[in-house]
Image (spheres, rainbow, N blue to C red):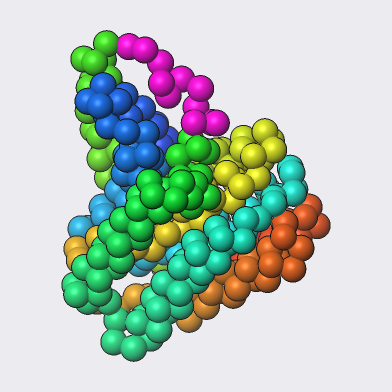
Amino acid sequence: MLLAILTLLVGLVVLIVGGELLVRGAVRVAERAGMSQMLIGLTIVGFGTSSPELVASIEAALAGSPGIAWGNIAGSNLANSLLILGVASIIFPLAVLRGQLWRDGGLALIITAALWYIANNGGITVAIGFGFLAIMGVYLGYVYWAEKKYHITDTAVHEKAEALELADTHLHMDQPIWRSVLVLFAGIALIILGGKWLVESAIDLARMIGMSEAVIGLTVIAIGTSLPELVTSVIAAYKKASAVALGNILGSNIFNLLLIGGITAIVSPGSIPVEISSFSLPLLVAASILLLILAATGRKITRWEGAVLLIVYLGQLLYSLTAI
């Protein structure tokens, strides 16, 4: 068991480091290739910062463990909406932009509710996976169009890129292109290797301690792969960039649901484990509604409201580990 735990931790660290290197290298290569900052933020930053969750879910799906894959998706969004948002709000109350809240938070709520319905009515199909990816494409197209034509910059994807810049002061260091390419490929290699170690050790650990793979995905893997988002959101809150902190969380939720959920559905269609469909997804719907209510009533998420979110997360975490 000790070896499985150690391998899981090493895999998690390698996965996160690989994701960081992937984003750094890809952004620098894209800049040298003449890509606009807007396109870099929409594509490379958005996809790259979600790479730990993406690789972990794909590895789990390919390994025949959809419970880990879907547990990681639902668990990561719970961590984003309750744990990370709660911690960030305690550090500095998060002001909420109405357009960002209803557009991005509303989209995340609708997709979560749809996933919950699908999970209890026939399960996930390849067609649903492609549908999720199509919605992701339409959303990114809308963000690009709105930002270019109307200079709307409060979208979750834009704030996700801003959060990364706040957290990583070395992102745009001037360095030779060959070094950026090397960093990019090193990142790709590390996330693949780290994801493989993480999933294999998680499967072994679940069998050893008699815990379902879905719970492992909901807890250990979800928290681990959400650590980069926690760091960037906390730094944004500490720097009083509250809109950036909230947008980073909403953007992560959208990418997790549509991009990672869509690819997972294509790779491993079928039923979603009951632990997720009967508890985690309805809780995620409730958390999304709670977020809209908290933000709409006061136009900001206060410290005590952040404490409530954090308490709810710790409560569901304890329930997942003991009752499911």
Question: In x, y percent, where is residue 39?
Answer: 32, 40
Front one among 259 and 63: 259
**In percent of the image, x 27 and y 45: which residue is there?**
196
Question: In x, y percent, where is residue 211?
Answer: 45, 65
Residue 321 visible in this rendered orientation of the protein: no
Question: In x, y percent, where is residue 268?
Answer: 21, 67
> Mainly helix, strand or loop, the magenta region?
loop
Examine the structure image and report whether residue 169 is included in the region drawn in magenta.
yes
Residue 114 visible in this rendered orientation of the protein: yes
Front one among 117 and 160: 160
**Horizontal arrangement in the rendering, residue 5 relative to residue 314 (left or right):** left
State the extent of the magenta-drawn residues as a range. 165-175
**In percent of the image, x 53 and y 50: which residue is there?**
154
Question: From the viewer's perspective, is residue 183 above or below residue 207?
Answer: above
The image quarter containing residue 11 is top left
Question: From the viewer's perspective, is residue 15 above or below residue 324?
Answer: above
**Horizontal arrangement in the rendering, residue 3 relative to residue 82 (left or right):** left
In the image, farthest residue toward the right: 304
Question: In x, y percent, where is residue 194?
Answer: 32, 39
Examine the structure image and report whether residue 290 is included in the region drawn in magenta.
no
Question: From the viewer's perspective, is residue 281 above or below residue 167?
Answer: below
Front one among 136 and 50: 136
**In percent of the image, x 30 and y 25: which residue is there?**
31
Question: From the viewer's perspective, is residue 17 above or below residue 100?
Answer: above
In the image, farthest residue toward the bottom: 121
**In percent of the image, x 44 and y 51: which residue is there?**
150
The image quarter containing residue 135 is bottom left
Front one among 130 and 223: 130
